[in-house]
Image: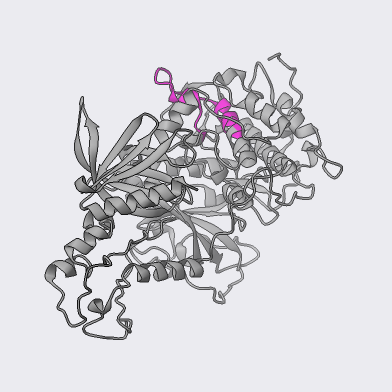
């Protein structure tokens, strides 16, 4: 790539001269985390208690004196409304400031979890980065205060009412060319600004790009950032930071493990791919597979991917950090801004990006691109109704299982109800096969339930086995969300035994067999002590998109299910012959579609 003479950066303009709107956070809020002892005696926080969300109720407002900034030094200065998001050691909540009535996002970091997970430095880095950047650029989330109490650290930040860019793409399916151009331009402009301030974000991804009331971006989550003491952002050794699908290949290089401002340009290219394609470029079943795809530059553009966007992705998603568009000295930020993706138009009503008025031009409304939305997700109330209904259907049985004691919480008419267990996100209760064979006499309603049947949720051992081992305690208490892709649910679930390699030899081991809503058959190694993780997946069979000849049979005599894929057979042994037959029918019907 030919070197290009760099034009003067627009970021040399003094901050005070830029019409960015709002004001910088007061100096008292940014000097450090305030200590509990600095508060007035009548404002002491209740010990070891986290803020509790409340319903929308009128919040008393106490106007601050014109000569003093509003107090933001303790949780008691806010009324917390609802949770906006959560992570391993932090929770973000919407809150109303009692002194002004203004709404903010308050990020709450657990001290205990930060220490336990050895992430204390991330909180300090985030505070220092936000203190340096807040109020300097419209594309960066603003921090108004940082304080602490006995259990937590608090950041008071801009509220982004429209969620994040990842949510927008999922809702739209994908973004149109002009919409993706507009958001990418804002990300580029913001990233170039933080680089000019000696900061590399290092965890740039659509989930960390928030959307303000005008649907403009606010870059957030600087916990993984690198703050250069001298402004030098050239490659340097780094520990692993970032997210699997967006991490740059130089950080995966075992010999060097370096990062630089070029890592952010890689992430911009990956984010643009996600906006246009509707899915990450290096998506895989687990992080390890994503890393291998990144190292091999193994990704493909879907049909209809916009040509100018494809060219920009190809010039940013480059294995050699020095060869990426916008990275000096071989390229420059000016060359990046001048790329055809930003300067060309897609129609009569479209306009190229005007960098000098990017943050004041009218926003581009969300538009669906080459991938249509999959359908609106149900509201919480509707989702809960569905969950309760499906759990009720799980134990719809004969009068044998009618409630024996009665009570206000027990349904009538001979229907027993088992209280729902905790359900992982995006996972619905499994479908249940019929448990009573046609030629088997149904027990009378007055029959006593045996202790063994009670332990199986009201089913006998035979019935429980016929039901696909859904009441097996090992399977009931597992959280399967770690091994499912976004939006994927479990259609059927059963305990099986199959040969799994351990060392140099294969031997029969207990596994779970999952049939999912995306026509996938997963065989997952079971561990009684730990929840399933991606590395426990031993087989993944794509039933409808494998490109190989598939067939499925049941060996009822030996209770075995055999799935023929190409020239290889996968054999799963069930606890009884009925379950194997049911699974064979389900898979065969799916293959026939």
- Locate residue 139, reporting x and y percent: 65, 44
Question: Is residue 144 shown left or right of residue 445?
Answer: right
Q: 274 or 589, which lies in front?
A: 589
| Residue 254 on the magenta span | yes
Q: 325 or 499, which lies in front?
A: 499
**Coloration of the structure image:** one colour
Q: Is residue 508 visible?
A: yes
Compared to residue 139, the image places residue 548 above or below, namely above
Q: Is residue 88 visible?
A: no
Q: Quadrant of residue 160?
A: bottom right
Q: Looking at the figure, which quarter contains the N terminus?
A: top right
- Locate residue 63, reporting x and y percent: 61, 70
Tell me what residue is drawn at x 60 percent, y 29 percent. 265
| Residue 551 on the magenta span | no
Over which residues does the magenta segment extend? 246-269
Q: 225 or 84, which lies in front?
A: 84
Compared to residue 229, the image places residue 460 above or below, namely below
Question: Is residue 542 shown left or right of residue 333?
Answer: left
Q: Residue furthest right?
A: 348
Compared to residue 174, the image places residue 414 above or below, namely below
Q: Quadrant of residue 312?
A: top right
Question: Is residue 498 shown left or right of residue 186?
Answer: left
Q: Residue furthest top?
A: 2
Q: Quadrant of residue 337?
A: top right
Tell me what residue is drawn at x 19 percent, y 61 percent. 462
- Locate residue 289, reporting x and y percent: 42, 31
Q: Residue furthest left?
A: 451
- Locate residue 563, reporting x and y percent: 34, 40
Number of numbered callouts drawn = 0
Compared to residue 579, the image places residue 48 above or below, namely below
């Amino acid at each position: 790539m030919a070197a290009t003479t760099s034009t003067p950066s627009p970021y040399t303009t003094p901050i005070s001269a830029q019409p960015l709107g709002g004001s910088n956070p007061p100096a008292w809020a940014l000097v450090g985390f305030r200590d509990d002892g600095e508060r007035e005696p009548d404002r002491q926080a209740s010990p070891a208690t986290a803020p509790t969300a409340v319903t929308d109720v009128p919040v008393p407002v106490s106007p601050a004196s014109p000569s003093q900034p509003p107090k933001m030094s303790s949780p008691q200065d806010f009324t917390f409304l609802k949770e906006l998001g959560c992570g391993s050691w932090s929770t973000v909540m919407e809150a109303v400031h009692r002194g002004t009535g203004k709404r903010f996002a308050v990020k709450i970091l657990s001290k205990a979890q930060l220490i336990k997970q050895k992430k204390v430095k991330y909180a300090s880095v985030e505070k220092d980065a936000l203190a340096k950047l807040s109020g300097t650029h419209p594309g960066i989330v603003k921090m108004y205060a940082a304080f602490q109490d006995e259990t937590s650290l608090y950041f008071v930040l801009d509220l982004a009412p429209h969620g994040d860019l990842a949510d927008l793409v999922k809702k739209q399916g994908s973004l149109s060319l002009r919409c993706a151009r507009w958001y990418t331009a804002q990300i580029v402009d913001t990233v170039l600004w933080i680089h000019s301030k000696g900061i590399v974000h290092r965890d740039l991804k659509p989930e960390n790009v928030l959307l303000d009331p005008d649907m403009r971006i606010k870059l957030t989550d600087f916990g993984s950032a690198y703050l250069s003491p001298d402004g030098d952002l050239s490659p340097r050794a780094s520990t692993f930071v970032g997210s699997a699908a967006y991490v740059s290949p130089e950080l995966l290089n075992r010999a060097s493990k370096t990062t630089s401002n070029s890592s952010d340009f890689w992430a911009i290219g990956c984010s643009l791919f996600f906006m246009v394609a509707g899915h990450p470029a290096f998506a895989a079943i687990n992080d390890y597979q994503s890393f291998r795809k990144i190292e091999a530059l193994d990704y493909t553009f879907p049909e209809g991917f916009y040509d100018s966007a494809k060219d920009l992705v190809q010039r940013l998603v480059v294995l050699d950090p020095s060869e990426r568009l916008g990275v000096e000295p071989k390229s420059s930020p000016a060359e990046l801004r001048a790329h055809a993706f930003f300067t060309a138009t897609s129609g009569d009503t479209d306009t190229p990006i005007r960098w000098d008025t990017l943050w004041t031009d009218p926003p581009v409304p969300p538009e669906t691109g080459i991938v249509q939305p999959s359908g609106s997700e149900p509201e919480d109330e509707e989702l809960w109704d569905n969950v309760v209904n499906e759990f009720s259907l799980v134990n719809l049985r004969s009068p044998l299982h009618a409630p024996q004691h009665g009570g206000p919480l027990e349904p009538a008419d001979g229907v027993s109800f088992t209280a729902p267990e905790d359900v992982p996100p995006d996972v619905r209760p499994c479908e249940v096969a019929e448990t009573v064979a046609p030629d088997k006499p149904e027990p009378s309603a007055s029959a006593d339930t045996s202790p063994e049947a009670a332990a199986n949720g009201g089913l006998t051992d035979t019935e429980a086995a016929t039901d696909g081992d859904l009441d097996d305690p090992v399977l009931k208490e597992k959280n399967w969300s770690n091994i499912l892709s976004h939006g994927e649910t479990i259609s059927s679930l059963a305990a099986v035994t199959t040969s799994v390699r351990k060392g140099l030899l294969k031997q029969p081991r207990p596994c779970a067999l999952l049939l999912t809503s995306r026509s996938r058959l997963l065989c997952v190694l079971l561990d009684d002590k730990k929840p399933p993780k991606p590395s426990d997946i031993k087989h993944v069979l794509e039933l409808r998109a494998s490109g190989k000849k598939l067939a499925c049979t049941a060996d009822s005599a030996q209770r075995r299910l055999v799935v023929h894929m190409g020239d290889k057979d996968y054999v799963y042994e069930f606890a009884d012959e009925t379950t194997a037959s049911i699974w064979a029918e389900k898979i065969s019907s799916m293959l026939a579609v």
